Amino acid sequence: MGRLDGKVALITGGARGMGKSHARHLAAQGARVVIGDVLDDRGEYVAAGLGPDQCRFVHQDVTSEADWATAVGVATEAFGRLDVLVNNAGVLRFGKIADMPLAEFRRVMDVNAVGCWLGMKAVIEPMTAAGGGSIVNISSIEGFTGTAGLSAYTASKFAIRGMTKAAARELSPLGIRVNSVHPGGVMTRMIMEAAQEPGHADGDAFLKSIPMGRFAEPAEISRLVAYLASDESSYSTGSEFVADGGMLSGPGY
């Protein structure tokens, strides 16, 4: 028996990186999964690997309210209910405040923060109809601390942390739990691509700041997401769950 047997999960940004890992791990734990992403070819590939009985892909821009309605509709029409939302989609941009265009700042906030808020809003009705559910918002250690060159990303991740707490208070009477996950350095393509941008953080210094001395594998974060999605975390809501290899444990970061 999987810890997520009988549950249906919607995962945004599920075509690659942590989202792909979340989709595969939740499916392995028994969930039926809908992947939302703007990367159609990659999303279809992940869904095909899991099979139509367990996974569907839907094109989804998380900044679009209409796309959220479509994604929720795919979940409820294909699998009959919606129990879990993993708000995973996000973008990372480096740039000092003095140099970053306003449009780029707004883009990061729209995808990371507004997209998360729209997701929580979109799943309230189907989760209430299902008798409750679990929302897992993927924030970051940047939701606790600031880093030079990451003002937009940091602002968005603090926003996710705050929205999680507000939503937990609002939605608890409906049986919907809301928690945030705060990874540190995770070895994903988004991180590798961002590291090529001008002004990016010093990768060697970042690695040295991790007490465990390594980056996380996506699966290590997925196991935490699965716990929060499952009934095993039934008394957890409005809380932050950190998986950072010890980065926030002291002044080294």
Image (spheres, grey):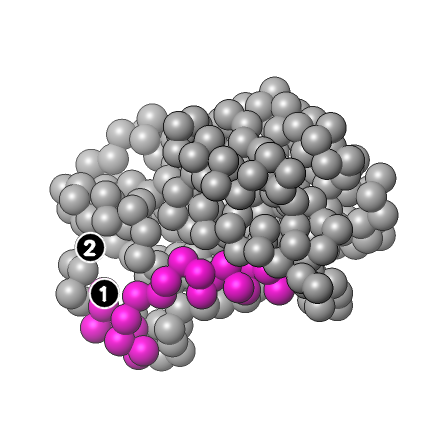
**Residue 253 lies within the magenta run:** no
As displayed, is residue 128 above or below residue 214? above
Q: Secondary structure at mark 2?
A: loop
The numbered dot on residue 65 is none
Is the residue under label 2 in contact with that under label 1 (CB below 8 Å)? Answer: yes
Q: Secondary structure at mark 1?
A: helix
As displayed, is residue 206 above or below residue 36? below
Image location of residue 38, percent across then percent down: 44, 28
Quick one: quadrant of the N terminus?
A: bottom right
**Residue 212 lies within the magenta run:** yes
Which residue is more in the foreground, 177 or 36?
36
Cα–Cα span, label 1 and label 2? 7 Å
Mark 2 or mark 1, which is nearer the start of the sequence? Answer: 2
Residue named by callout 2? 201
Residue named by callout 1? 206
- Name the residue located 51 percent from the left edge and 37 percent from the top edge: 47
Which residue is more in the foreground, 134 or 251?
134
232 lies left or right of 145? right
12 lies left or right of 250? right
Stretch in magenta: 206-228
Magenta highlight: main SS: helix
235 lies left or right of 35? right
As displayed, is residue 183 above or below residue 67? below
